[in-house]
Every structure is written in C-alpha cells, then in structure tokens.
Image (cartoon, rainbow, N blue to C red):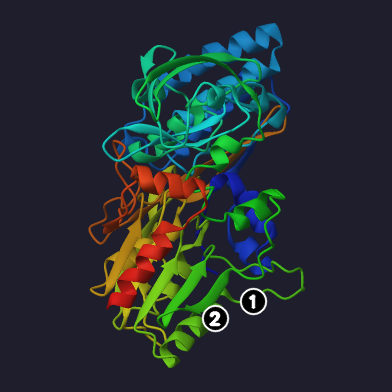
Amino acid sequence: MRKQVLRALCLFCTLAFLMLPPACAEESGTPDQTADFPQRTWMEAFDGLHERFSAEYAFTDWKGIDWNALGSLCRQEIQSAQEKEDFQAYYLALRRYINSIPDGHVGMSSVSEIDQQFVSGGFGFSPVLLDGNGVIANWVDETSEVYRAGLRAGDELLTWNGQPIAEAAAEVRAIFASNAATQEDAMLKRMAFLARAGVGDRAELSFRSTAGQMVSVPLTAYEDGMITIKKTYPVAVVSDRLREMMLGIDSGAPPLTGVVEYEILDGNVAYIRIWGELDADLTDSGITPSTVALFQNAVKSAQDEGCQGMILDIRNNVGGYDEMAAALLGSFYARETFYEYQSDYDGATHARVIQRSMPDSDALMIRPADTVFTGRVIALINQKCVSSGEGLALGIKNLPNGETLGYYGTNGSFGMTGGQAWMPGGLSITWPRGQSLDANYQVQLDSRDGIGGVAPSIRIPMTRENALLVAQGEDVELAQALAILREN
C-alpha cells in the first residue's frame, strides 16, 4: 500500500498520530525515520543528530543551510555544557541550533521549567509592529509600572534599552517560540518576545504619551501568565484549540467537536472552518468521522442553501495529509488539476525520489468532488496556517473565483515530515525529509531567503486601529471577508 504523506507541525506529529485512525498511523512512516540517542553522552548524541539531520533535511540547498558552520558552533556549546554537567546550557544550545533553521517544520520539545526562567516575566504592555514600521502598545496592564508612568494603549513605543525599538526587536533571538520560516513571521515573533524576560529582569522603555510627551521609564519584569502574548495577533482573536488539544493544554476554551465546523452567516454567506487535514475523534466517541465527508457535506449544504459566497477559515490550520488537502479542494475544481509532486528522502540510497502519489499518476491531482461550489470563495489565512493548510490556501488563491485574506501570509513551511531524533534528557527533535514540487519539479511554498507561503490577495493592514481591536478580541479579518461577500 502506498505510504500516505503527513504534513503537520513537526512539534505535534507524535501527539497528532495518537488522534488518527490506526490505518493512517501505520501508513505514516518507515522504521528508519527515527534516531534514538538518549543513552549517548550529550556530545555523542549531538554528533549523531547533526549527521542525521544534515543528511535528511529536505531544504539544505533551497535555504542555503551551512551545516558545517552551524554544527561547529553548536558543538562547542554542547562540549562546554557536558564538561560542566550543565543540562540547562545543553538544552539552550540545542534550542539555538534548531532555531537557526528557518522552517516551521523543524521543531524541538520544550522543558517548561527552563523556558519560564527566560520568558515568564512581562513588562505590562504588548508591542505591535504596524504597517509602515511604527510600533505601538496595543494593550497596557493598568496595574503596571508602565501604566503609572503614563503609557496607554495606542501610544507609540520609541526605544528599548536606549535602542530604537524596531532595531532592538530585530536582535531578539526568539528561541522559545516555534521556528519562523519567513521574515514576516520572524519579525512578529521577535517583537512579541522583546517584552518577555525572566521575572525580576530590568529594562528601560521610552514612549510618546497620548499628550505628546516623551517619557522614559525603568521597568521590572513580573509574572503575568504570558498575557502580553495573549493580547497580540493571532492569540487574542483566533482560537488554536486543535493545537492545544494535541499538546494537552487546557486554555479554558470549549472543546472541539469536529475538525470541520459549518454555519450560515448573515447575508446567506457560508462559513466553513477546517482545523486540519486529518481525521480525528475529538469527542472520544470511539468513532472517527471522515473529515473529507464532513467538508463535502458542508459544501453541499451551502450549495443547497443558495449561498453565493463562502468563507473558508484556515487560520491556525495545523496541517495533515496532502491527499486530504487535494480531496478537499475537489469541492472547488470542476476539472482535474495538478496539486504536487512528492519528493522524499530514501534512507537506503540517501537520494531524493519522486513518490507515486496516486495509483495512476506520479503527481497528486485535485479531482472534482460530486458537488463543486462555484460561488466566490475567500480563504482566511495567517502565519499559523501551516503545511497542508497552505496547500488549501494556494488551491483557493489559484481559483478564478477564489481569494485569500488576512493580516499576514501563511507559514511558508510545506515540507513532508518524518525525520526525528530522541536526545538525552527526553528531548525530541523533528524535521522534514520530503519536498513538495510544482509542475516544473521546483520546490513550492517553502520559504527561501525569508520569502514563502501564500500571501493574502486581500491584505488587511495592521493599523493602529486594527491593533487595538486585536487586543479586544475583535475579528477584523472575518468581518472584512463577510462585508466583501455581502456586497457581491
């Protein structure tokens, strides 16, 4: 039986498999994909990891990864940590190593106790980069030092520790965030973590107050439950419930009942949300519903209701199976259309080989479903729409009646997962082994030189007004898409 290719956030792959039907789990990998180094010394384990990672990684040439330089630098740090028997130093060295690869499919498990030493403190405000490069606080804690000094939501932030704030953010190493594949996402992560530190750490902020005064204030980081992150996009606006369920995080949000959600909005506009391209029993019923069937039923209902427009919400889409993404797109394509070639790493020959994607074709094709929706479709996207979710975004954008809308583009990580290593300390590191190729056999969607993914064809600007609405949880993207479809 042909191996199905799973695209999902690498950090979540192991957990995601637990939610999939047994048949899919059995088909999703080969025995040589996982390397086990837990019993080795830190140095031996790193050498084994580096050899395996650098050989298998799908985008060394595409992204211009200098493995020799990267390995040499990290090896020195690992050696120093081993000599001192310093687990924290070993862990941080690995995090810097992994974070150096601009790929959202490259990930590493976390040690929360260590992470919190560096990021559990906030300074009472959330910095947001506006279109045009200005930076404001879109939210301010009214009990904080900085509020008492006069900072209010909407005020312009000028310097951080004496440095222009955008420059200061550009120097932040956001190693405790997931890897950023694009320049856009990297800057968003750096800006968010600029205002994170260890509890008790000190910094100095200057800002222009509402009254127009220049104010400089010394600040001390305090435990805040990571609220400065929670007040920025997308956390403040878009639910990430499927990722949270995969990771066992209880955010207090209602549990999901299905991977597909459907409703008719005012103006007879269909709204379909897809959390991922995978089948999952989210209610522990013992029955795993077909995501493709759920989606096709929703599209048929929209057609039967006479909906002239549809919003396809794939923000925070976690990814999943390529075959499923192509099947979902069949609800919008009246003719068979190319989706991708799949090039995977062969552990036996150490070569990349085009996989047979369908019984009658090397290429994975979009084939029309029984019901094809021909009205206008707007896909809502963001930087946490990753992997096969990005395939959906591309497929919608390529339609004559399709558009993508959002503040930001998709993640820019479209490789095929599979590489994994277990390291001393219970750490797991994952990476993509396979590539998605376009009809000309060129890498598609994966970022290069910081550019990749699917850009919004309708870009919502991150203005001061919109940044303030984000902090209040207002879904401007959905409102804009709905307004556009109602007008038509």
10 Å neighbourhood of mark 2: few (<14), some, or many (≥20)?
few
Q: Is residue 235 visible?
A: yes
Q: Is residue 371 above or below residue 313?
A: below
Q: How many marks?
A: 2
x%, y% of residue 42? 65, 20
- Considering the numbered disc 1 on the image, is that residue within a helix, a strand or a loop? loop
Residue 289, disc: 1
Furthest-bottom residue in view?
304
Q: Nearer the viewer, residue 301 or 290?
A: 301
**Residue at image location 45% in from the left, 54% down from the top:** 385
Drawn side of residue 311 relative to residue 7, left or right? left
The residue labelled by disc 2 is 293
Q: Residue at x 72, y 33 (%)?
A: 426
- The reply to whether callout 1 and callout 2 are in contact (CB within 8 Å) is yes
The amino acid marked with disc number 2 is Ala
- Tell me residue 239's x, y (percent): 57, 56
Above or below — where is 314 with respect to 122?
Answer: below
Quadrant the C terminus occupies = bottom left
Give percent across and percent down for residue 297.
52, 84
**Mark 1 belongs to which amino acid?**
Pro
Helix, strand or loop at label 2? It is helix
Residue 285 as seen in the image, left or right of residue 226: right
Work out how far the residue at label 1 is from the one at label 2, CA to CA, in angstroms: 8 Å
* Quarter occupied by residue 206: top left
